[in-house]
Image (tube, helix red, strand yellow):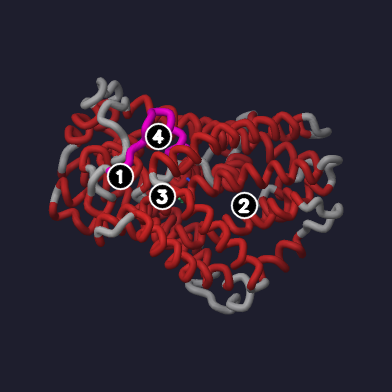
Amino acid sequence: MNKKSNFSSRIGFIFAAAGSAVGLGNIWRFPYLAAKYGGGTFLLIYLILAVTFGFTLMITEIAIGRKTGKSVLYAFSSMNKKFNFLGILASIVPIIIFPYYCVIGGWVAKYFSTYVCNPAKGTVNGDYFQGFISSTVQPIFWFTLFILATALIVMLGVEKGIEKASKFLMPFLALLSVGLAVYTLTLDGAMDGVAYYLIPDMSRFSFNAVLAAMGQLFYSMSLAMGIMVTYGFYVSKKENLEASVRNIEFFDTAIAFISGLIIIPAVFAFSGGDESKLSAGAGLMFITLPDVFGNLKYGNIVGTLFFLLVLFAALTSAISLMETIVSVIQDKFKVKRINACLIVAGLAFLVGIPSSLGFGVWSEVQILNLSILDFFDFISNAILMPIVAFLTCIFVGYIVKPKAIIDEVEESSVFKSKKIYTVIIKYVAPILIILILISSILNTFG
Ligand code: PHE
């Protein structure tokens, strides 16, 4: 595939990749996990893993993309023919995730619009959420809008669409999250939440906490779904990859950390320190937090800003998913960007509808005891992503050898962490990933 459009600047690339990394996972999963696994203890484990394990996987993917100049479909096979299947496997992941990610993006857009319309106190509650997701037309309407917004940006291309949008959205997102955190810290009772979040509780340290941190890291850094390979091939040969990855990592971790500072104290302040209110996922974001907002003096403004933050986070992640699929389609079928975008948007619409209806008229449909959306989530996150990551480590560690990646990084600058990189990619990462795979299967069905 020709490099038709590239990131025009280092900062553009960093914002775009950070935009992919910062998503729903940072806001609705990280705070919950941190609260569950001992606050400060979890933060520490997460940080150590981010600069070792996360760094290694991310720089690997970006270097593969830049080295081969191919979409993820052919990137591996262009380095070794036998690994054609890995490109196919890695391309399937974003294809599965994109439609249902847009369904949730649609929910976020709906909540943003709800708060903009200044709802009466107490009306945005659990019933409101249930009523909304179980209806047929409304969620599909918002989901369609979300796909269209994503498609519009991707259609404009890497530099004029993705880079421009990220350069605007990411700084704004950072400001919003800092502003909201400062505000929630001033609420009565918030400091108990801060203490709970930040003070390490060593009694909660467990192997499971390490696994949870690793699983989260993996998802949060948008690894093993072809995204970083895709963004990698738009990066210039002059770019210092090591420094870029450190920046992306920092951005991703900082936003996750600040989300915890927004959510945990806010929930604590209104539940009198009841940590059980910090549930994971949709319940936290669409029921618990709106409850908190309903109790605040300026709750509707806070709600508006909060859902705007989440909307930006979800949008930049969806963009990276779509770009990955679009680059695969362009590479495979040699079609123009605009046509590839139309195909992907149309297919995502069709495939997303069952996920949306799975909370309403199709709620009877269960696969492996999961709703349709949760099933797609399970297959991609719990199964395919660890497999792709594991095979990528084997591919780099033993087939093409770490030197191939190190040389690529050194095209632009000295690879300072190359020794530790080699150890992690060959030995540490593959073992850790197998453990993630086993634990995520057990967690879903255990
Ligand atoms: N990294 C994103 C997050 O933390 C997750 C994600 C990004 C998922 C892109 C899919 C695609 O939420």
Q: Nearer the viewer, mark 1 or mark 4?
A: 4
Q: Nearer the viewer, mark 2 or mark 4?
A: 4
**What distance separates the C-alpha of mark 2 from that of mark 4?**
31 Å
Proximity of marks 2 and 1: CB atoms separated by less than 8 Å:
no
What amino acid is at disc 1?
Answer: Pro
Q: Secondary structure at mark 1?
A: helix
Q: Residue at x 39, y 37 (%)?
A: 54
Please identify the quarter of the rendering in which residue 270 is found.
Answer: top right
**What distance separates the C-alpha of mark 2 from that of mark 1?**
28 Å
Q: Magenta includes 7?
A: yes
Q: Is residue 370 visible?
A: no
* Residue at numbered disc 1: 430
The percent coordinates of residue 189 (x first, y second) are 81, 34
Of labels 3 and 1, earlier in sequence is 1
What amino acid is at disc 3?
Answer: Ile
- 187 horizontally vs 398: left or right: right
Q: Which residues are magenta?
A: 4-18
The percent coordinates of residue 441 (x first, y second) are 44, 59
Q: Which mark is residue 280?
A: 2
Q: Secondary structure at mark 4?
A: helix
Q: Residue at x 14, y 49 (%)?
A: 80
Of labels 1 and 4, earlier in sequence is 4
Of labels 2 and 1, earlier in sequence is 2
